[in-house]
Image (spheres, rainbow, N blue to C red):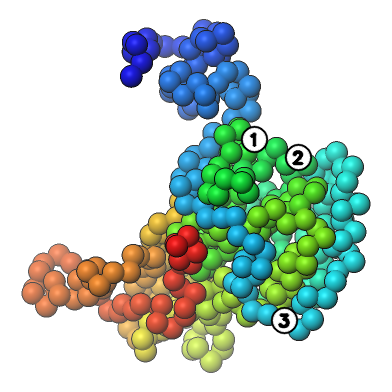
Amino acid sequence: MPRAHPPTVLFKTFTPKTLEPFHGKEGGRILLAINGIVFDLTAGRNFYGPVNYLESLDVGAAAFCAEIEKDVVGPVSGAVFNEFLLKVVNEDSPSQEIGDLIGKLKDVTSESSMYKPLVDAFASQCPQLVFNDEHNLSVKYHDYEIQPDITIRDKKTNDTVAYVQVKVSPYNDPFDDNNPGHIGDSVAARNTLGQITRYATAHQGLSFQTHVFSVLIFPPYLRFMRWDRAGVIYTKRLRFSEPDIAIFLRRPSGASREYRGCDVSVKSVSPEDGDLVSIRNTLGLKEDAELCKISIDENLYFLAKNQAHGSISPIGRSTRCFKAYSKTTKGLVLLKDTWRLMSPHLIPEDEIYKKLQAAQVFNLPQVYDGANVLSKNPWQETKTASMAE
C-alpha cells in the first residue's frame, strides 16, 4: 500500500494553460484531458508518464489496445500459422523477389519508401490477388477512419483478404518473441497494437467475416496475424529469407473464400432469386443497390450488402441487426446476427423466444427462424482459444 493517498482535486475547472504544468516531470502529477474531462493518471506513472507519453499517446488506439491485450496468443511459427490455409502446388519453391526485400529495405527512412518494394515483391507470388498502396485513402467505420498502408484484395471478387501495416522501426513492434503473450510497455508498441486492432475490427465489421488476416512489417522482418471474435494469433518474427513468408502469400491466392475468412453463408444474389426490383423497393433501396442473401433452414432473406457494420469491439458477441426482406412472407423482418458462446447450458435465443410464445407471453416479437451456422461451416467457430490451449 502507498504511504499516503495521492492528492485528489474534485470539481476543478482547467484551461489548457492551467493544465500544462501537470506533465509528470520531476515526480509531479500527471493530468490528461480527453473530450473536456480531466483524468488524474499519476498512479499509473510507470505507463503514462512523464511528458513523452502525453505527447505521443493515441487515445483511440490505446482503447483498442486495452481491449485486446489479454486475448493475444503467440508467438507461433510460420509453419503452424500457415496451417490455417490449404496447401497449394509449388508453394515451397524459393522466392527471389521476397528474399531481395532484405537489401531493398535495409536503409529505408520512411514508411512510404517501403510500399512499392513490398507491393511488387508480394504481387509476384499471388497472381489471383491485388496488392494496393492505399495509405492515402481512408475507410470510415462507425465514428473513426482507418488508413491501411497496403490492402490485399481478391482480383475476381474484390474481397479484402488482409490489411498490411508498415513501420520503419522495430521499436513499434507490440510483440516480444521472448515473452509469449506479453505486450510491450512502450507507447509506440501499444499504439501499434491499438492501430492494427482497430483495422482488424473494421475489416470484420465492414463485411461478413468469420476471421481476418493482417500483416505487420518492419524492415528486417514481418509478422502475420489472424483475428477472430476470441482474440488474435500472431507469428514470431519472420525474416524475409524464411520460406514461410512466400508460402503464406501463395496460399490465400489459391484458397477458397471461407479459408480466407469470408462468411460463405452470406451469398450474392442472382436474377433467379426473384423480383429484385420489388425487393429493393420494399427495403427502401436505390435501384442499383447491391444485395446479398442469407438462408436460414429453408427460408431466404435479402438485405443491403453495404449495411454490414458490425461491433466496435474486436472480440466478443458482435451482435448486429439488419433490415431484411423475407422471401416467405414477402415483407420486412429484423435479421439478427450474433456470435455467441457455445455451451450445452446455454439455450439459443430463438428457442427461448419460441418457448415464451408457446407459453403465450405477451409483448414479444414474432420469431420466424433461427439456426446455428456452425453446423454448415467449421470456420464459424473461433480458433484463438484452441490455439492458446
**Residue drawn at (67%, 48%) of the image:** 147
Whether label 2 touches label 1, CB < 8 Å: yes
Mark 3 lies on a secondary structure that is loop
* Three-letter code for the amino acid on which mark 1 is drawn: Ala
For mark 2, what is the residue? 169
Q: Which mark is residue 77?
A: none
Q: Give left or right: position of 179 versus 5.
A: right
**Residue drawn at (66%, 68%) of the image:** 79
Q: Quadrant of the N terminus?
A: top left
Dot 1: few (<14), some (14–19), or many (≥20) neighbours within 10 Å? many
For mark 1, what is the residue? 188
Mark 2 lies on a secondary structure that is loop
* Three-letter code for the amino acid on which mark 2 is drawn: Ser
Q: Which mark is residue 88?
A: 3
**Of label 3 and label 2, which has the lower sequence position?**
3
**Of label 1 and label 3, which has the lower sequence position?**
3
Q: Give left or right: position of 365 versus 200.
A: left
Q: Is residue 100 visible?
A: yes
Disc 2 to disc 1, how far (Cα)? 10 Å
Whether label 1 touches label 3, CB < 8 Å: no
Q: Is residue 145 above or below residue 293?
A: above
**Residue drawn at (8%, 74%) of the image:** 359
Dot 3: few (<14), some (14–19), or many (≥20) neighbours within 10 Å? some
* Three-letter code for the amino acid on which mark 3 is drawn: Val
**Residue drawn at (57%, 45%) of the image:** 179
Q: Give left or right: position of 175 versus 371.
A: right
Q: Is residue 336 above or below residue 276?
A: above
Mark 1 lies on a secondary structure that is helix
Q: Is residue 32 visible?
A: no
**Of label 2 and label 1, which has the lower sequence position?**
2
User: Where in the figure is residue 261, as x and y percent of width and height?
Assistant: 57, 70
